[in-house]
Image (spheres, rainbow, N blue to C red):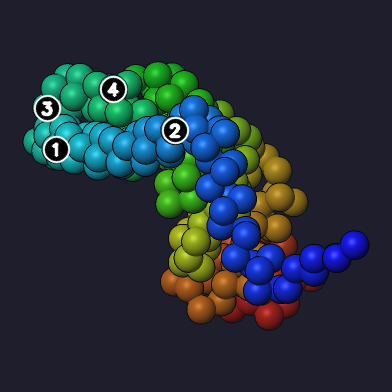
Amino acid sequence: MATTISTPAQTAAAQPSALTEWFKAHRQAATYAGVVVALAAGLFGWNLLSTRTAERNAGSQLEQGRLALDSKNYPLAASVLAQVVENYAGTHAAQEGTILLAQVRLAQGQTQQAIDVLQRYAPKADNDFRAQAYGLLGAAYENAAKAKDAATAYEQAAAAAQYPFLRAQFLADAGRAWIAAADTAKALVAYRTIVQQLDSTSAVGEAKVRVGELTKGAGGGSSVRK
């Protein structure tokens, strides 16, 4: 009996034929898969276009709210910014709008409303806005005479700050708030962090003075000049 031996070239040539036969046998599945891919591509393009449109619309309304805030038309600013935050959640403009809305609440004397807005927003804010959100929350707590809460918020702002000068400023704010809360030990930690780690920032001069005052020239204040 003769034995037929397939050469590698014959085997390779048979592979496209086998693939063709698979598609013939699974024509419906192959067609469905193609439709799914086409739909996915269409949805991706539609989502991208929708996102860009939302950002553009939100940015336009955000600018209206900012102008109203700058002109001290607080009721209009609050109305417009609240719409941006609610209608365009997840956009860059909505995050900035939340910060501006909290500023409006503070300007209107609605401190607790500002605190409520920032308490919800700050923990989930993007990196570009988190430090500012916590810093504004600290200011709101100070307005409400909640010094300990203010100090904690300022420390969170310092931890989230992306630039040394901002970190130093928020630590100085935290130190001031800790002093108001009668916790000089934590105030010293904040001021000494500025002196030891952020000595190239403009806040270092005040920090050295505060360390000297809090230690009365002893211990950590030995190298501090008033």
Foreground disc of the pair 3, 4 = 4
Name the residue carrying label 1.
60
Measured as percent of width and height from the top left, residue 182 is found at 67, 40
Query: Considering only order in the chain, which callout, 1 or 2, is on the residue closer to the N terminus?
Result: 2
- How much space separates mark 4 and mark 1, taking CA atoms? 13 Å
In the image: residue 94, left or right of residue 112: left
- How much space separates mark 2 and mark 4, taking CA atoms? 39 Å
- What type is the residue that disc 2 sits on? Thr
- What type is the residue that disc 4 sits on? Asn
Name the residue carrying label 2.
31
Question: Does residue 221 lie above or below 91 as drawn?
Answer: below
Q: Residue at x 58, y 50 (%)?
A: 19
Q: What SS does tag 1 mark?
A: helix
Q: What SS does tag 3 mark?
A: loop
Measured as percent of width and height from the top left, residue 133 is found at 45, 40
Query: Considering only order in the chain, which callout, 3 or 2, is on the residue closer to the N terminus?
Result: 2
Foreground disc of the pair 2, 1 = 2
Name the residue carrying label 4.
87
Label count reads 4
